Amino acid sequence: MREKRVILAFGTRPEAIKMAPVHLAFERQGAVVPVVLLTGQHREQLEQALSLFGIEADRNLEVMTDRQALPDLAARILPLAAGALKDLRADYVLVHGDTLTTFVVAWAAFLEGIPVGHVEAGLRSHRLSEPFPEEANRRLTDVLTDLDFPPTEGARQNLIAEGKNPDRLVVTGQTAVDAVRFAAGRGRLPLDGGGRKIVTVTLHRRENWPRLAALAESIRALAAEFPDHLFVYPVHLNPVVREAVVPVLDGLENVVLLDPLEYGAMAALLGASRLIVTDSGGLQEEGAALGVPVAVIRNVTERPEGLLTGILRLIGTDPESVRSGLSLLLRRGILPGQVPPETNPYGDGRAAERIAQAVAWRLGLGTRPADWVFAAGEAGLS
Ligand code: UD1
Ligand code: UDP
């Protein structure tokens, strides 16, 4: 009998980081052959994310163009992905998260009659405009899937409310937790903080673009207010983001703008931080996994569990409230370690292993894994 092949399909930095542990888990398991299909929605940031894990692509569709428009990107990915899935003899396809790559590859697989599993399924903000277009990408993907991997019980409940078959939902925990644990100790801090408290900043989301320069002004004001802190901002390669942020923050004494960091260095930076200020999804989970508080620059988060443990604080997006909210957090907010990583509601570091087992189960090669159950009592939530 021919060996079974699972295609791990992804295209951007966060997908690569959170799918890498799944690839490693398939390699350890040995029952199913993992094959990596990159759409190349990102280029440099994707290569950087993969380098720490030593994962090489079997195929790269190289679709990225400078300042790409989303409809064009979707139109490029669909036929190329469908062709590659056939060519690579896919028995099963895994997609991750909420990008355009996620939905379009799932759609391509569906149209080719190949079963799809969705890693990090079921996260919902219940607002189509935030995060945009990711909330829609998630919902559209979950219409097409054979298996869904909600990281938490809350995400599972969202899928059940949408009519998904409970037998095909496996609660796994977040593979971001697996990833950041893998990275810990494998990368070097990208700068010398000189004894100052580090605040790591990343802002790049599309719905924040209209106010990105104003948000950068808020960071500038905070840097002036907290001269004993060092604000470190690895800036996304998107030119829209760089054009808004660099003119406001460049050249300040206690603000360091960096090019995107490879994942080992990023994990080291996060681990050394007093606070993470971000509109990113993955950093919310990584902060919780490291016990580092996260100020979320969004109006709503599809990852609400960390709000309950206190490791996440929803700050909103109004620039003046962001400045005052962050100022308060830096003066009187929780400290690193105060919500310990052991009470992390996002995962236990074994998500990838459950996903590999579940795919083997669907391919007739093993048994269904048990769901991950978060011990809420340990986090003081029961
Ligand atoms: C995309 C995802 C978003 C995810 C983010 C992670 C969609 C709609 N958006 O947003 O969900 O949170 O990735 O970072 O799927 N660029 C480079 N090199 C790179 C990467 C990007 O030059 O390695 C530049 C290019 O000019 C590109 C632009 O950034 O056209 C935008 O990339 P795109 O993937 O469309 O959007 P992101 O904002 O990165
Ligand atoms: N990240 C990284 N280098 C950087 C910035 C971020 O490795 O310079 C990692 C970060 O730790 C997280 C992921 O990239 O794992 C988040 O990606 P991004 O913010 O681009 O996307 P999002 O999480 O918003 O979807």
Image (cartoon, rainbow, N blue to C red):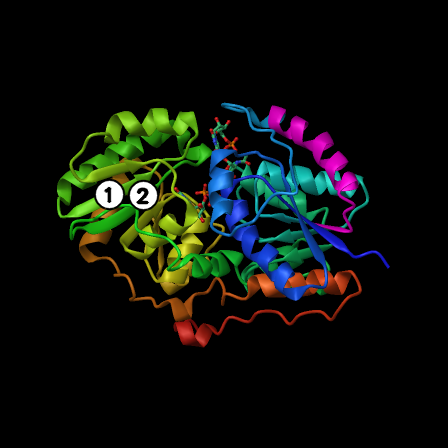
Per the image, the residue denoted by label 1 is 231
Q: Which residues are magenta?
A: 72-93
Q: Which mark is residue 201?
A: 2
Q: Is residue 90 magenta?
A: yes
83 or 33: nearer the eye? 33
| Pointer 2 or 1: first along the chain | 2
Q: Is residue 281 magenta?
A: no
Q: Residue at x 50, y 49 (%)?
A: 17
The residue that appears at 39% across and 29% down in the rendered structure is: 241
Residue type indicated by callout 1: Phe
For label 2, the SS is strand
* Residue 307 numbered mark, or none: none
- Whether tag 2 and tag 1 are in contact, CB under 8 A, the answer is yes
Please, what is the three-letter code of the amino acid marked with disc 2? Val
**What residue appears at the point 27 percent right and 25 percent down from the top-left corner?**
247
Q: Quadrant of the C terminus?
A: bottom left
Whole-percent x, y for residue 173 in the image: 54, 63
Residue 49 percent location from the top left of the image: 48, 45
Q: Residue 271 in the image: state x and y as whole percent.
A: 32, 57
